Amino acid sequence: MKKNIAILGSTGSIGTQALQVIENHPDLFRLQIITAGSNAELLIRQAIQFRPGHVVIADEQKYYQVSESLSKYDISVHAGQDAIEHIVENDSIDLVLTAMVGFSGLKPTLSAIRSGKNIALANKETLVVAGNLIKQLSSAYKIKIYPVDSEHSAIFQCIVGEELNPIEKIYLTASGGPFRGRTKEFLKRVTSKEALKHPNWFMGNKITIDSATLMNKGLEVIEAKWLFNLHPDQIDVIVHPQSIIHSIVQFEDGSMKAQMGLPDMKLPIQYALGFPERIKSDFPRFRFTDYPNLTFEAPDLKNFRNLALAYNTLEKGGNSPCILNAANEIAVDAFLTGQIGFLDISDIIEKALDTGYFIEKPDYDDLIQTDMETRKIAAQLVAGYNQ
Ligand code: NDP
Ligand code: MG
């Protein structure tokens, strides 16, 4: 039986790598739905190659271009953010890969869960913003969430077969990004071009900046709490610049299990799509002699404050991770467009967390409201830097 897959964000870094996995295994997977933000050209090419039943372009102005180009194929074309939310309810799908970026993935993810679809989750921001709600809904609708993020896939792979053995602690590994070891003086002056050069991974712009500021690791700490049901003091971060060990689980007898391999997102993507099967692959293999030194060091929380801010919101709970995420999305965008400096990102997030209205047990509407309010606060803070 083939698994029927929907990919939300098929034109992005995760989306295109997921399509390579599907292309290599036509016997195992059938692509039913693909969606994009505004990259109509690539979406059209993907649709012609894979012939899914449906494609969605979020940017409604691109609807005509996509539907004209696909008119001679048996493919339904839809447009708009709401269409993404509705299409995931389609009966033809078994598994939804959420590979959109940021808060935009929240509504479609909730809608997919409510329609009983299993989720391969790349879009970590959704768990950061609404972890509690997603956990409640996934147990109410009896769906499974398979992590795609490489660190969480590593933890997931380490605990298969250990269901009765509690986790004592996990170590999420971090590459440290392009500015590891740099001083505040240096960081003050870095440009977005420099920040976009990640040493080990080629990813979308937003997550690449998050990796440079260590916010990515902060978001992953929060993601791990929800995926594996952990307390903040059970989640540690260790910098491992070679990105060979993807993360580690420590059990109550002191034994540690790590998952390792060359950094290649196709592996965790394939594991999430194929679970519980390990699908044979020809991905390049790790050779010990190429890496005589695997090294580890503590993260620098003084110069890279975002990780500390994320830990604070995890302790505080409520809607504070939602504030953290929204302020970060605005600040990263402002950094990418040259409106603020690298270190201003943390300042804006911290001020937004101080200003934002705290809600201890937010419901869905509270989260939507918090996201909206925080974006306004963060945008005002950004404007302050441009005067
Ligand atoms: P990209 O920016 O490369 O891709 C994002 C995808 O989402 C694109 O298909 C984009 O469409 C679409 N999209 C963006 N905004 C919207 C919107 N408002 N409405 C509808 N679709 C939208 O991101 P990545 O692939 O790098 O990351 C995706 C997610 O996976 C993120 O949450 C990231 O944190 C996570 N992740 C990524 C990893 C990686 O290696 N890249 C590793 C681990 C996690 P378009 O192309 O048209 O703009
Ligand atoms: Mg990761």
Image (cartoon, rainbow, N blue to C red):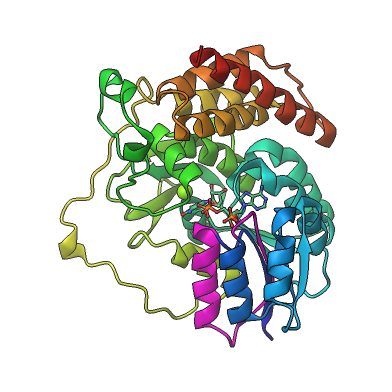
Total of numbered circles in the picture? 0
220 left or right, relative to 374: left
Q: Is 83 situated above or below 69?
A: above
Q: Up-down: is 141 above or below 367? A: below
For the point 69% across and 68% down, the residue is: 66
User: Residue 284 occupies which quadrant of the picture?
Assistant: bottom left
- Vertical arrangement, residue 12 with respect to residue 353, above or below: below
Quarter that holds the N terminus: bottom right
Judge whether residue 16 is colored magenta.
yes
Residue at 59% across, 34% down: 231
Q: Which region is colored magenta? A: 12-39
On the question of residue 118 being in view, the answer is no
Q: Residue 127 location, x and y as percent?
A: 65, 43
Q: Residue at x 73, y 18 (%)?
A: 358
Q: Position of residue 117 (x, y in %)?
A: 76, 64
Residue 304 falls in image quadrant: top left
The answer to whether residue 185 is left or right of residue 160 is left
Q: Quadrant of residue 72?
A: bottom right
The one of 11 and 282 positioned closer to us in this rendering: 11
Is 59 contained in the magenta span? no
Judged left or right of residue 254, residue 135 is right
Please state which of residues 93 and 248 is positioned toward the viewer in this rendering.
Answer: 93
The answer, for residue 196, to whether it is visible in the render is: yes
Q: Position of residue 17 (x, y in %)?
A: 49, 66
Q: Residue at 83% across / 72% down in the picture? A: 91
Residue 180, position in %: x, y? 28, 34
Relative side of 26 to 290, left or right: right
